[in-house]
Image (cartoon, helix red, strand yellow):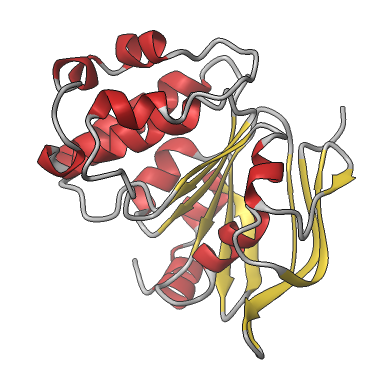
Amino acid sequence: MTTLLEIHGLVSGYGAGQVVRGIDLNVEPGQIVALLGRNGVGKTTFVHTIMGMVRPIAGSVLIDGEDVAGLPAHAIARHRIGLVPQGRRVFAALTVEENLRIAVRGVRGQWTVDRVYDLLPRLRERRRNWGHQLSGGEQQMLAIGRALLGNPRLLLLDEPSDGLAPAVITQIIDLLHALCKDGELTVLLIEQDLRSAFALADTIHIMDHGILVHSATTTAFRRDRATAQRLLGVS
């Protein structure tokens, strides 16, 4: 089976500054991989580089063996890569329905607006509400629903728990479990919330100062409190 996402020596940043400084990372079909790290270590820049929102300085980003590094975001999205960005970024001046409708692309697959509503009935209830009228949890569900409408094989989730109450984070975890249970959706999860990462991921990678400094199975990492304390500042 071909590796779905294969990253070699990826370097990127802004202007003359390097934020991502040579990352190698593989994500196999059906995996849920978590990338953890403190604020400011380069996690979002890394995701934006994969997605074509930041141009790489060096390295390769292979999707099904095809190097897409440096392509614009819309071209990478055509490879059925979806992004749920940090901060949700829903359109405040559009309704829930309009936010979803503009995300529909001509990609064959199982996800339609009606199916998103079936998965997330709260969005159906709020479909005529403006984006700015939604709670943080509702905005996050809208951002996930919007990404699903591209019928992605790989979903990049950037800090989906950010700013949400613990009860809402549990709802998001349950939603992602439901989406991934059949193995058809592959996920790269960028997180600071260990509970989310431990509940969802098969594999944990730790990023610090633009490089990967530790990788382990989730089971092994949960037992390694010393490493968690040293790299993440948690016990």
Q: How many marks?
A: 0
Q: Position of residue 218 (x, y in %)?
A: 54, 46
Task: Quarter of the image for the N terminus: give it.
Answer: top right
| Residue positioned 40% across, 10% down in the render | 115
Q: From this viewpoint, which residue is outermost toward the bottom?
A: 16
| Residue positioned 83% across, 67% down in the render | 59
Q: Can you say whether 68 is above or below 187 in the image?
A: below
| Residue positioned 38% across, 60% down in the render | 192
Q: Position of residue 11 (x, y in %)?
A: 73, 74
Q: Can you say whether 140 is above or below 104 in the image?
A: below
Give the camera-side residue of 106 and 27. Answer: 106
Give the camera-side residue of 131 and 10. Answer: 131
Q: Position of residue 135 (x, y in %)?
A: 13, 40
Image quadrant assignment for residue 93: top left
Q: Is residue 22 visible?
A: no
| Residue positioned 28% across, 23% down in the render | 97
Q: Position of residue 123 (x, y in %)?
A: 23, 22
Give the camera-side residue of 47 and 3. Answer: 47
